Image (cartoon, rainbow, N blue to C red):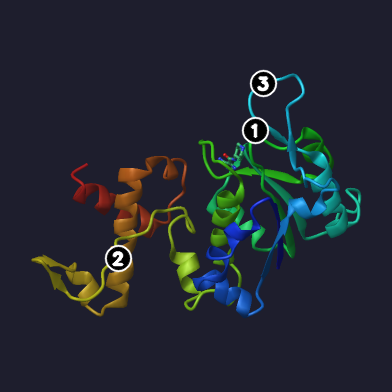
Amino acid sequence: MNIHILTIFPEMFQGPMSSSIIGRACQKGLLSIEPHNLRDYTKDKHRQVDDTPYGGGAGMVMKAEPFFEALTELTGSPKQKKVGRKIIMLTPQGATFTQKKAQELATMSEIIFLCGRYEGIDERVRQTWVDEEISIGDYILTGGELATMVIIDALVRFLPGALGDEMSAQEESFSDGLLEYPQYTKPATWQGMTVPAPLLSGHHEQIRKWRRKEAFKRTYQFRPELLRGRSLSIEDQILFAEALQELGM
Ligand SMILES: Nc1nonc1C(=O)NC1CCNCC1
């Protein structure tokens, strides 16, 4: 997968995108991440990327030209849609990013992220080039760069070979629609708090059931809406009932 990022702050990506799992995935050749400085696509001596909004009002708007120049260089023309490529704009009015969307994006061969700053990007960029608008939440950031990094961080986990233990991407929260069960590591007792006995039993089936029941407890307590309308297997119905009983419901 090739990721291109159009931004006026390419340097923001150096640390996070070259560290840990993401950095290792790039070194393994599973993906490439290439920020492009929009100022390199300006034609004036001041390398201007923004200007005042038509109609007045506070703040500045990002000019269309640098985006058009960069996207033309990267893709040819807006009409040249390519299977497996998405041009994504980060914006609060986009669809809220989810684990399911992360998994879907991980199947793409190329993604181009458009990072806005200031009051936003000239509308003609969205009209002409953008395939999808994504928001990482209902709040206003100073730019789309951190949102882009959040999305890359979430999707990289679904690239085959990116994680040491492939299963953890599947087992983690939201992968099967439930929140994560509690995790423990050594020592077995810490400041008088002990690890739950099933986890010390070495009995894999017991451990699996305990984890599933704890996931039901957490989901019911913190994100009950994830359970609404969900069809459960017979085993899950039993475990969910036990979870509610243990919660005193
Ligand atoms: N929330 C968001 N999810 O993606 N992008 C988001 C965002 O707030 N972008 C800013 C909006 C104002 N202009 C600068 C960028």
Mark 3 and mark 1 in contact? Answer it, CB < 8 Å: yes
Between circles 1 and 2, the one closer to the viewer is: 1
What is the x, y in percent for residue 217?
Answer: 29, 51
Residue 82 visible in the current orientation: no
Which sits in the foreground, 149 or 164?
Answer: 149
Residue located 76% across and 43% down the image: 48
Pointer 1 or 2: first along the chain: 1
Answer with left or right where residue 4 lies relative to residue 24: right
What is the x, y in percent for residue 29?
Answer: 66, 78
Residue furthest toward the front?
45
Instruction: Identify the disc placed on residue 119.
Output: 1
Q: Residues within 10 Å of mark 1 (few under 14, many from 20)?
A: some
CA–CA distance in space, label 3 to label 2: 50 Å
Residue located 59% across and 44% down the image: 143
Name the residue carrying label 3.
Answer: 57
* Label 2 element class: loop
Image quarter (top left, top right, bottom left or bottom right) of the C terminus: top left
Q: Is mark 1 within 8 Å of ligand 1?
A: yes
Name the residue carrying label 2.
Answer: 183
| Ligand 1 shown in quarter | top right
Q: Residues within 10 Å of mark 3 (few under 14, many from 20)?
A: few
Q: Residues within 10 Å of mark 2 (few under 14, many from 20)?
A: few
What is the x, y in percent for residue 122?
Answer: 76, 35
Tell me which amino acid carries mark 2: Gln
Pointer 3 or 2: first along the chain: 3
Mark 3 and mark 2 in contact? Answer it, CB < 8 Å: no
